[in-house]
Amino acid sequence: MTDLPVQKNEYYDVTVQDLTHDGAGVAKIDGFPIFIQNALPDEEVKIKIIKLKKGYGFGRLEEIYKPSPYRVEAPCPIYKQCGGCQLQHLSYEGQLIAKQKQVKGVLERIGHLKEVPVYPVLGMEDNPWRYRNKAQVPIGEREGGLIAGFYQQRSHEIIDMKECLIQQEINDTVVQTVREICDKYGVRAYNEKTHKGTLRHVMARYGLVTGEVMVVLISRTPDIPNRKAIVEEIATTLPQVKSVVQNVNTKKTNVIFGDETRVLWGNEYIYDYIGDIKFAISARSFYQVNPDQTKVLYEKALEYAGLTGEESVIDAYCGIGTISLFLAQKARKVFGVEIVPEAIEDAKRNAALNEIKNAEFSVGEAEVVIPKWYKEGNTADVLVVDPPRKGCDEALLQTIIEMKPKKVVYVSCNPATLARDLRVLEDGGYKTIEVQPVDMFPHTVHVECCALLEINQSENL
């Protein structure tokens, strides 16, 4: 690679131009992109080239000559080792600006949608810290005792951690207390290399409105030594805990959950609210980790749907019914579809819990079920999609184009696949009216978006 404009182990002065989707700074030397961890846009810096590929390289930040006006000192002591947050060195105002720029950039680059308005990101107004209602913390051992913490970046070494600044404080307390109790009763941590030991993870779930807590002990073995005494002490020490659950994962895998889940003490569910809707949350329920911002996102989806009470709505990828139940308050009928059978059971339970009778839920792949409904003559006035990071399946997009609902509301956790899918829908006769980003995960690179599409009337004249 002698024809490259930079050499490994050499030093260069550069101006950082942008951030990547994973939070690294980007600078160019004679058009050749260099990715630099912890560098921010508009900074003038000195870097050392540490790795080179054919079309790009990696630089280590050596010195900052001119810092960004948005640069701050990361408050977390293990920020650089952990990697769970990527943007703590960027002020919250700066994060929101960067996320809006990211969404605009991918819509233009991937979707060729230069004219679509992308509004400023809706951020957390009061305090963008301590928002996560679920902690899944790996357990390890050091000097004969249990430790609980997150994995170091690009490794499976656990960093011993007493608190995480984006977790609800109660979750930190619960995880550390459970770790201490398990340690006291001689429970040993699971060892990935030897496939020995018992306790793999401790999970804490917290109902922000109700104050209820669930503890999940994820173990390699069905039996946990001194289980009865451990559970009793958890219940006595932590009065907020309403449920203690065990999940058994016997496999050699880095997937957290196994197939078997059982309640050891208390209730199978804890409860929480998003707006006026009450949700039952089990150990394995998918439930948004930032309920305050989820309400902001779903209210935007409801606004875009523009429901009057006469509409039939389809909610693809409905999960446990979170968006469906919001929509059902204003729609004539909502049909939800989701591939995970347990999620559909949760959705039905949540509908009953809120006495919502105009929402129906079906198990299956959205790209299979919705085309089947369409062939049977079932159409929708409004179609809502909230797909996983990979975006919508091509068959579903084609069905939307054939079905021609007046409006499509696209909720996305990945701007790149959103841009790709908007391009397909635009080519199929839709117009993207606007995109509203919402910051669900402050201090990380992730951003959610809500996009409104309408049938392009000029093409239907």
Image: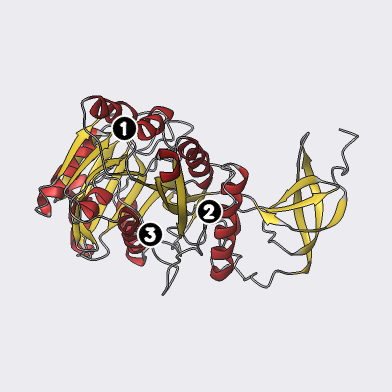
Q: Is residue 145 above or below residue 366?
A: below
Whichever of callouts 1 and 2 sits on the residue coming sooner in the sequence is 2
Reading the image, the residue beneath label 2 is 116
Q: Position of residue 237 (x, y in %)?
A: 23, 63
Q: Residues within 10 Å of mark 3 (few under 14, many from 20)?
A: many
Residues at discs 1 and 2 in contact (Cβ within 8 Å): no
Disc marking residue 366 = 1
Of 148 and 453, the residue lying toward us: 453
Alpha-carbon span between mark 2 and mark 3:
32 Å
Work out whether mark 3 precedes mark 1 in sequence or the reverse, and give the earlier one.
Answer: 3
**Residue 281, x across and y down, in percent:** 22, 50
Q: Is residue 268 visible?
A: no
Q: Nearer the viewer, residue 56 or 79?
A: 56
Residue type at mark 2?
Val
In terms of depth relative to the viewer, which is nearer, 174 or 66?
A: 66
Q: Residues within 10 Å of mark 2 (few under 14, many from 20)?
A: some
Tag 1: residue type?
A: Ala
Q: Which residue is denoted by mark 3 in the rendering? A: 132
Could you say which is closer to the camera, residue 446 or residue 234? 446
Which element carries disc 1, helix, strand or loop? helix
Q: Residues within 10 Å of mark 1 (few under 14, many from 20)?
A: many
* Relative height, residue 74 to residue 383 (above, below): below
**Residue 333 located left or right of residue 90:** left
Secondary structure of the residue carrying numbered label 2: loop
Residue type at tag 3: Arg
Instruction: Judge whether residue 102 can be spotted in this image.
Output: yes
The total of numbered circles placed on residues is 3
**Residue 355 - label:** none
Q: Earlier in the sequence, mark 2 or mark 3?
A: 2
Q: Quadrant of the C terminus?
A: top left
Q: Tell me if 30 is positioned left or right of 89 in this view.
A: right
Quadrant of residue 289 within the rendered picture: bottom left
